[in-house]
Amino acid sequence: MEETTRIATRLLGHIRSDLLETDESFGLDSDLFAAGLDSMSIMQILLFIEEEFAVKLPDGAVTRATFGTARHLAEAICRTRSL
């Protein structure tokens, strides 16, 4: 499995089990904001990313576009790792 997809799948699992109530059709490219993502959820995701992936996203990466989907978040993690 591609690294980005693996990370996105792990993020989605955390989001679905701990942060947002979603059904089985909610996937890697589903809109997190439409599912109820809010500022508190974003903070929890940032903490999860730091703990799970040992990555601190730069302030410039904390945008609505980055947090739009689990896949976008995973791409931001991969970009940050490569810096």
Image (cartoon, rainbow, N blue to C red):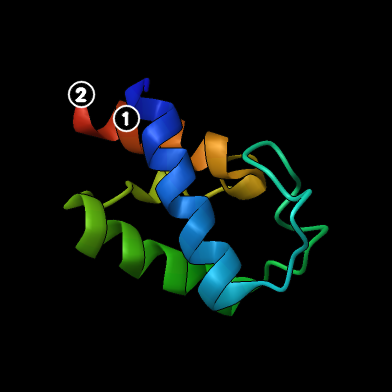
Quick check: 25 above or below 80?
below
Instruction: Tell me if label 1 and label 2 are in contact, CB under 8 Å.
Output: yes
Quick check: 13 above or below 40?
above
Percent across and percent down for residue 51 are: 21, 64
Q: Is residue 55 visible?
A: yes
Dot 1 surroundings within 10 Å: few (below 14), some, or many (20 or more)? some
Q: Amino acid at mark 1?
A: Cys
Decide if residue 30 is on the left or right side of residue 12: right
Disc 1: which residue: 78
Residue occupying image coordinates x 47% and y 40% = 8
Decide if residue 83 is on the left or right side of residue 7: left
Which disc number belongs to residue 69? none
Q: Secondary structure at mark 2?
A: loop
Q: Secondary structure at mark 1?
A: helix
Residue occupying image coordinates x 32% and y 48% = 57
Q: Quadrant of the N terminus?
A: top left
Percent across and percent down for residue 9 are: 47, 43
Disc 2: which residue: 82
Q: Amino acid at mark 2?
A: Ser
Q: Is residue 64 visible?
A: no
Q: Quadrant of the C terminus?
A: top left
Percent across and percent down for residue 35 are: 78, 62
Quick check: 63 above or below 4?
below
Residue occupying image coordinates x 33% and y 69% = 47
Residue furthest right as drawn: 34
